């Protein structure tokens, strides 16, 4: 079955006071729904870009994200869906779409998953 990456975007410089009440719980419910439906292949949340990103371009290494943007990728999921329309239905249910962020859906061209969990 085809796989799709769902890139989850959030405000780049949001502080804890700006977090929508219940946001984390909404994301956890969405995650559980994807697991229960069998669509979820993998999902990862990323640390805040402004605090933890390191960018490399050529031989230059700099602290911070590569570009200054209003939104950054906060996480991503890989889902299996029969077609793009089905993947869009899954992505549309992501709480980020109602919390000031958004999602981008792209077909996966290929990849590899090592048999080990992501580190925290």
Image (cartoon, rainbow, N blue to C red):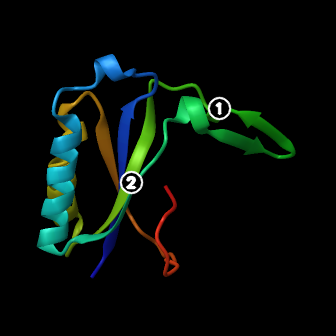
Dot 2 or dot 1, earlier in sequence: 1
**Alpha carbon separation for disc pair 2 and 1:** 19 Å
* Residue 15 drawn above or below residue 4: above
Q: Quadrant of the N terminus?
A: bottom left
Give the numbered dot on residue 100. Answer: none
> Is residue 22 toward the left or the right of residue 61 in the image?
left
Q: Secondary structure at mark 2?
A: strand
Residue that label 1 marks:
64
Q: Which residue is label 2 attached to? A: 76
Measuring 19% from the left and 68% from the top, which residue is drawn there? Answer: 35
Give the camera-side residue of 105 and 74.
Answer: 74
> Residue at the right extreme?
59
Q: Residue at x 40, y 48 (%)?
A: 75
Residue 108 left/right relative to 60: left
* Secondary structure of the residue carrying numbered label 1: loop
Q: Residues within 10 Å of mark 2 (few under 14, many from 20)?
A: some
Mark 1 neighbour class, 10 Å CA radius: few under 14, some 14 to 19, many 20 or more: some
């Amino acid at each position: 079955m085809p796989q799709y990456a769902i890139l989850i975007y959030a405000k780049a410089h949001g502080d804890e006071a700006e977090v929508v009440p219940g946001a984390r719980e909404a994301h956890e419910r969405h995650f559980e729904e994807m697991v229960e439906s069998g669509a979820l292949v993998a999902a990862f949340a990323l640390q805040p870009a402004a605090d933890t990103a390191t960018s490399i371009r050529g031989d230059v290494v700099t602290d911070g994200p590569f570009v200054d943007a209003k939104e950054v990728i906060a996480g991503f999921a890989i889902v299996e869906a029969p077609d793009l329309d089905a993947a869009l239905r899954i992505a549309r249910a992501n709480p980020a779409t109602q919390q000031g962020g958004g999602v981008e859906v792209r077909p996966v061209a290929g990849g590899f998953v090592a048999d080990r969990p992501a580190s925290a």
